[in-house]
Amino acid sequence: MAEQLTKNQHIVPKLYLNNFSIPDSENEVFARFRGLEGASPKPVSTDSICYRKNFYENPILTECVGPNFIEKTVNGLYEGRYKEFLRETIANGLNLRHRLSIRDKRALAKFIAYQYLRTSRCQAFIDVAHEQDAPASRAQPLSAAHAAILLDTWNGEGQVQGLQEFMLQRNWAVVVNAPELTGGYFYTSDNPVCVINASADFPEGNLLPIIQPASSFYFPLSPRVALLLLTIPIRSAKVVMTSRDMLERLNNLVYQQSDCVVVSNQADFSLLEGQRSMNAREYKAFLSELLPDIKAQVGSLFG
């Protein structure tokens, strides 16, 4: 009997989203959908968000290896390696004496790189770029170029590995949120790997910043633990964040770079109060100012 196609294919793994679960729940989060900012957030299952219909499928791939190869084989085995590792990393992150090892950083960098490349916005950008570079290949279905990049990970090579090495060249800081002082928690989204560009160059109409030599990264791991991968020097690899202003800026970054939904462990999205989707000019200014804002707080945030 032929294998049935899994239609709802996650662009962000549930094992990651579950780390933002509502207290006393294992797989429910509060979701704020773009375009519905005035609606009251309601608990939703991580099964029901951050997916796209038939996202990883295309006729060429299906003919070669059958349906669900990326969804179940590549993603499934890849994610399975990280479920406990991410939980341990979050637990260790709350231990102020613990420091990430080189092995930890390599594993995290690979997970973050793969996550950056698997989202719908990145797929659209890769396919447009591929179409412009090789118009004759338009005989191939859209998503073929994107699927090829994800399959390279299965073979232990390609852009994921290149991006992993690039991220390892940053200065890593584990940021521990002190909610009793900041008054809130880290959010995440359906595009959780946030890029902070010094020049903030990105294609018109595509608010996914293109990674450049000077790019830094922000990646929330849980409501209380996040990673900053920075080009600027830092004093400590483990910091406690007590600034509500910086928490608000980082959550706004998550919101602006999200595609459809922002996720939290709390129904309170007050840190996004008054925020709206920025136009290209506003967004470019926001990104241009964010890294200097982080630099300005080196004395307190990274002291």
Image (cartoon, helix red, strand yellow):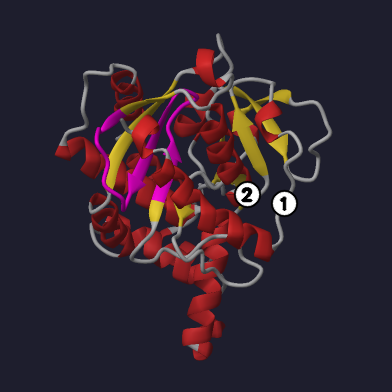
Q: Where is residue 89 in the image (x, y as percent from the top left)?
A: 30, 26
Q: Residue at x 28, y 54 (%)?
A: 164
Instruction: Write down the region rendered in magenta.
Output: 217-238
Q: Which residue is drawn at 35% across and 24% down?
A: 90
Residue 222 belongs to the span the image colors magenta: yes
**Element type at mark 1:** loop
Residue 163 belongs to the span the image colors magenta: no
Indicate which disc residue 179 carries.
Answer: none
Q: Where is residue 95 in the image (x, y as percent from the top left)?
A: 28, 16
The residue type indicated by label 2 comes to: Gln
Q: Position of residue 214 (x, y in %)?
A: 35, 62
In the picture of the structure, the residue carrying the numbered disc 1 is: 277
In this rendering, the answer to whether 159 lies above or below 49 is below
256 relative position to 233: left or right: right
The residue type indicated by label 1 comes to: Ser
Q: Which residue is drawn at 39% across and 66% down?
A: 212
**Spatial separation of the CA atoms under disc 2 and disc 1:** 6 Å
